[in-house]
Amino acid sequence: MNNDIERVLYSQDDIKAACQRLGAEITRDYVGKKPLFIGVLKGVIFFMTDLMRELDFLTDIDFIDVSSYHGGTASSGEITLVHDVDTDISGRDVVVVEDILDTGRTLAYLQKRLGERQPKSLKVCTLLDKPEGRTVEAKADYVGFNVPNEFLVGYGLDYNEYYRNLPYVGVLKPKVYGK
Ligand code: XMP
Ligand code: MG
């Protein structure tokens, strides 16, 4: 698996430091508010578990599963809701947690869909932000790293469902996806 990686962008230590920084920032903003954290499956699971353990306040967790990739390295553009949250979010402070913000379509979809349910507030935390990928307007309130416009895998990010379990974020060798 490691042989398929061209270079490591963020090591386990880099990611840990980013989780600690974001956790401290979010703790400052939300202490005493009991916000709900909604992770966007599946890519977010590694980041979500590490981030949540850096938060020093009462909070609950839910997940939403949306899919925009149907294999390959480019978003299909069409968002499908695979699994909705179980929690009633009306009147709640909500933080959506994402692995990566790329075209912005997933986030725009979630902000619309969750925003309709009248949360008290709705903010977004993403580990990775790829600003060059943006095709629709979308902005995260908390960002771990700004990343170059390359296809990334590891720490939750997949190529055809593989590589999620790499402990770091890396650039996949183009030959792996047939370029
Ligand atoms: P959009 O384009 O909707 O993307 O902002 C959000 C979702 O697309 C996936 N994504 C990636 N997955 N490597 C991946 O493995 C990437 O470089 C990449 N860029 C986007 C990701 O699931 C994210 O939630
Ligand atoms: Mg995702």
Image (cartoon, grey):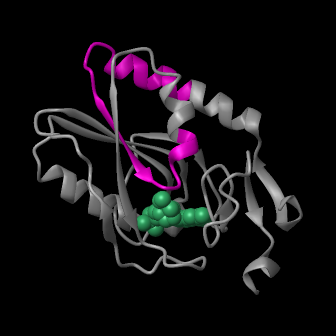
Give the residue drawn at x 34%, y 72%.
79
Q: Is residue 130 left or right of residue 82?
A: right
Q: Position of residue 38 (x, y in %)?
A: 34, 42
> Is 87 left, or right, of 165 in this rendering?
left
**Given the current orientation, which residue lies at the most extreme right position?**
3
Q: Which residue is located at x 20 percent, y 58 percent?
A: 113
Q: Residue at x 69, y 55 (%)?
A: 154
Specify whether residue 103 is in view. no
The image shows residue 13 at horizontal and vertical percentages of: 75, 32
In the image, 49 versus 119, the foreground residue is 49
Q: Is residue 126 visible?
A: yes
Region rendered in magenta: 21-47
> Which quarter of the picture shows residue 108?
bottom left
Q: Nearer the viewer, residue 138 or 49?
A: 49
Q: Does 159 appear above or below 176?
A: above
Judge whether 161 appears above or below 20 on screen: below
Quadrant of the image containing the N terminus:
bottom right
Q: How many marks?
A: 0
Image location (x, y in percent) of residue 76? 44, 81
Residue 148 pos. (x, y %): 65, 60
Location of the C terminus (image quadrant): bottom right
In the image, residue 139 above or below residue 4: above
Q: Is residue 102 left or right of residue 14?
A: left
Q: Is residue 37 magenta?
A: yes
Identify which residue is drawn at 31% across, 40% down: 123
The verdict on residue 35 being magenta is yes
Nearer the observer, 4 or 25: 4
